């Protein structure tokens, strides 16, 4: 009994010491983060200050954009959202963080987005000089002259979309899922522009694995940037089918690149312009890797974001007959040959509709993260070195300091002289394509697709939402995740397009 009791007593004392030590370390960790960390002066939720996974937990709800807005309403312009990260809700911060004179760099979180550091897409490259090299290689593909040559591909796919809506919707008898159909359009357009062949979604008119794969890839990207540590463990933590979808998407892009390279002198699509950049690779495998990584980004960035804005615009036009009537009046005055991007860009209301939809429903609800390389002033707040910074895009675009009635969809705010605040302060707060050397290179392409698509659909069809809504609500997984939007689509009796039901 004595021996047993002695051992038990020693074990008990040892356990108490270990527990006490652990508690002391945890307490010291908390005290350091709350009272001695360089961000100690910035307010925020207590758990966010000490828990590096707090941001991930919020992101998982899909409501991060609204949570950030509430936090900024409570704590002010700068909110500490992680032990080493802040969110800054101030229009001046956008230029300070993303502008050409900014000293901030892409966050280390980008390193968690892929496994091959030698073949990174333009969105993942952190080195400014390497990024500039690739951007210069891509720039000719997105020039006005190049995009003019590709416009007919967008128009061709819009023909397929219009015929598909009539065919599968029975001219209004069957509600259609516009969330899917807008994705079909953007995928087929990007397929044509990147690989010289579409994905065939508009003709098939049904869900395809590639859509699920891109959704999974975008979600992974969001969580990877919120927690690079968890992203590095994806092979152990992520569900098997989730990882399989990531692999399938990359494999699909690689296969299409291989097929496209069999005809390197093909038409002037995006690959045509990328070949010079890829040819600088040391090996054929690296060449293929560079092309695959870049087209992955083009497909991801170009399909989901454009489809989100197109779907949202249809939704708001359907519940706002005042704006719809004005737009149709302008469009009905055109003849078929005038339905070009050059002609449509001269209709101020059409661009105002696109801009307002981008404001109320930005495709990236929260900015991608940046790291400070030294202590720097952002929106007049001194942010220490080695701190991650994000801009809550949705919250800024819904801020009454910059916009009149920010919760309302009012396209006229961009063109009516009565909205001076929106056209001055609002323009500084509205940066859906970012700015500076890393601004979205596909901005012009997005406007072409959106102008042509909205004009064609509004001029050709009446949309009756199956379930009336007051606003278009999305979820925040970095890229906005759209709700299903069902509508009955009927051909307008006086349409001049002569669409056929195949």
Image: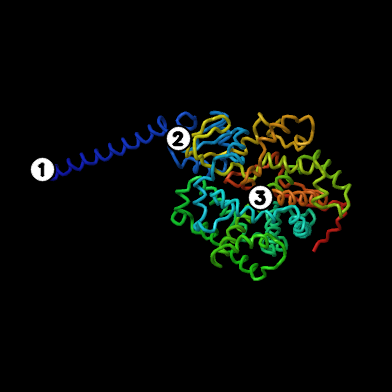
Q: Residue furthest left?
A: 2
Task: Please give the residue where the numbered disc 3 appears in the rendered image.
Answer: 441
Task: Please give the residue where the numbered disc 1 appears in the rendered image.
Answer: 2
- x 47%, y 48%: residue: 228
Point out residue 13 in the picture as x, y percentages from the top left corner. 20, 39
User: In this rendering, would 405 be left or right of 346?
Assistant: left
Which quarter of the figure has residue 9?
A: top left
Point out residue 5 in the picture as x, y percentages from the top left corner. 14, 42
Q: Which mark is nearer the camera, 3 or 2?
A: 3
Cα distance in 3D space between marks 3 and 1: 78 Å
The answer to which of 299 and 101 lies nearer the viewer is 101
**Do the residues under discs 3 and 1 have CB atoms within 8 angstroms?**
no
- x 56%, y 36%: residue: 68
Quadrant occupied by the C terminus: bottom right
**Do the residues under discs 2 and 1 have CB atoms within 8 angstroms?**
no
Asked which secondary structure carries label 3, the reply is loop
The answer to which of 105 and 408 lies nearer the viewer is 105
Let me know if residue 161 appears in the view: no
Q: Badge 2: few (under 14), some or many (20 or more) residues near its Cα, within 10 Å?
A: many
Quadrant occupied by the N terminus: top left
Asked which secondary structure carries label 2, the reply is helix
In the image, residue 356 above or below residue 153: above
Point out residue 418 in the picture as x, y percentages from the top left corner. 78, 29
Let me know if residue 385 appears in the view: yes
Q: Badge 3: few (under 14), some or many (20 or more) residues near its Cα, within 10 Å?
A: many
The answer to which of 337 and 470 lies nearer the viewer is 337
Mark found first going from the N terminus, 3 or 1: 1
Q: Which mark is nearer the camera, 2 or 1?
A: 2
Task: Please give the residue where the numbered disc 2 appears in the rendered image.
Answer: 49
The answer to which of 13 and 434 lies nearer the viewer is 434
């Amino acid at each position: 009994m004595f021996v047993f009791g002695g051992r038990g007593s020693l074990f008990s004392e040892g356990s108490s010491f270990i527990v006490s030590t652990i508690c002391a370390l945890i307490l010291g960790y908390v005290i350091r983060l709350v009272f001695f960390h360089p961000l100690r002066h910035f307010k925020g939720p207590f758990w966010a200050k000490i828990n590096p996974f707090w941001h991930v937990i919020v992101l998982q709800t899909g409501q991060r954009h609204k949570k950030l807005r509430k936090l900024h309403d409570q704590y002010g312009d700068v909110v500490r959202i992680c032990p080493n990260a802040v969110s800054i809700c101030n229009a001046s911060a956008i230029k300070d963080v993303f502008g050409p004179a900014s000293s901030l760099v892409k966050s280390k979180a980008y390193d968690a987005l892929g496994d091959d550091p030698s073949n990174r897409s333009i969105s993942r490259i952190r080195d400014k000089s390497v990024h500039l090299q690739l951007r210069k290689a891509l720039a000719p593909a997105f020039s006005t002259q190049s995009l003019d040559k590709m416009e007919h591909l967008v128009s061709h796919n819009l023909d397929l979309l219009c015929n598909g809506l009539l065919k599968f919707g029975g001219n209004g008898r069957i509600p259609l899922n516009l969330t899917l159909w807008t994705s079909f359009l953007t995928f087929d357009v990007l397929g044509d522009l990147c690989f010289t062949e579409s994905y065939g979604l508009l003709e098939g008119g049904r869900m395809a694995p590639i859509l699920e794969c891109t959704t999974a890839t975008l979600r992974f990207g969001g969580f990877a940037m919120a927690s690079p540590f968890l992203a590095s463990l994806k092979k152990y933590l992520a569900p098997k089918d989730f990882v399989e979808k990531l692999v399938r998407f990359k494999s699909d892009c690689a296969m299409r690149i291989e097929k496209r390279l069999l005809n390197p002198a093909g038409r002037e699509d995006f690959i045509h312009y990328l070949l010079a950049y890829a040819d600088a690779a040391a090996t054929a495998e690296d060449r293929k890797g560079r092309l695959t990584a870049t087209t992955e980004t083009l497909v991801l960035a170009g399909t989901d974001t454009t489809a989100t804005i197109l779907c949202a615009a249809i939704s708001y036009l359907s519940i706002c007959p005042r704006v719809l009537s004005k737009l149709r009046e302008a469009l009905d005055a055109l003849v078929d040959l005038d339905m070009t991007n050059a002609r449509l860009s001269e209709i101020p209301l059409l661009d105002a509709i696109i801009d307002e939809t981008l404001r109320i429903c930005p495709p990236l609800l929260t900015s991608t993260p940046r790291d400070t390389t030294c202590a720097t002033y952002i929106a007049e707040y001194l942010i220490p070195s080695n701190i991650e910074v994000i801009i809550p895009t949705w919250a800024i675009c819904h801020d009454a300091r910059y916009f009149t009635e920010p919760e309302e969809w009012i396209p006229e705010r961009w063109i009516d002289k009565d909205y001076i605040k929106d056209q001055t302060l609002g323009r500084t707060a509205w940066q859906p394509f970012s700015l500076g050397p890393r601004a979205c290179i596909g901005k012009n392409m997005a406007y072409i697709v959106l102008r042509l698509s909205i004009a064609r659909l509004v001029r050709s069809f009446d949309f009756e939402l199956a379930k009336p809504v007051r606003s278009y609500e999305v979820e925040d997984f970095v890229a906005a995740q759209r709700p299903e939007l069902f509508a009955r689509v009927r051909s307008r009796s006086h349409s001049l397009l002569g669409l056929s039901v195949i």
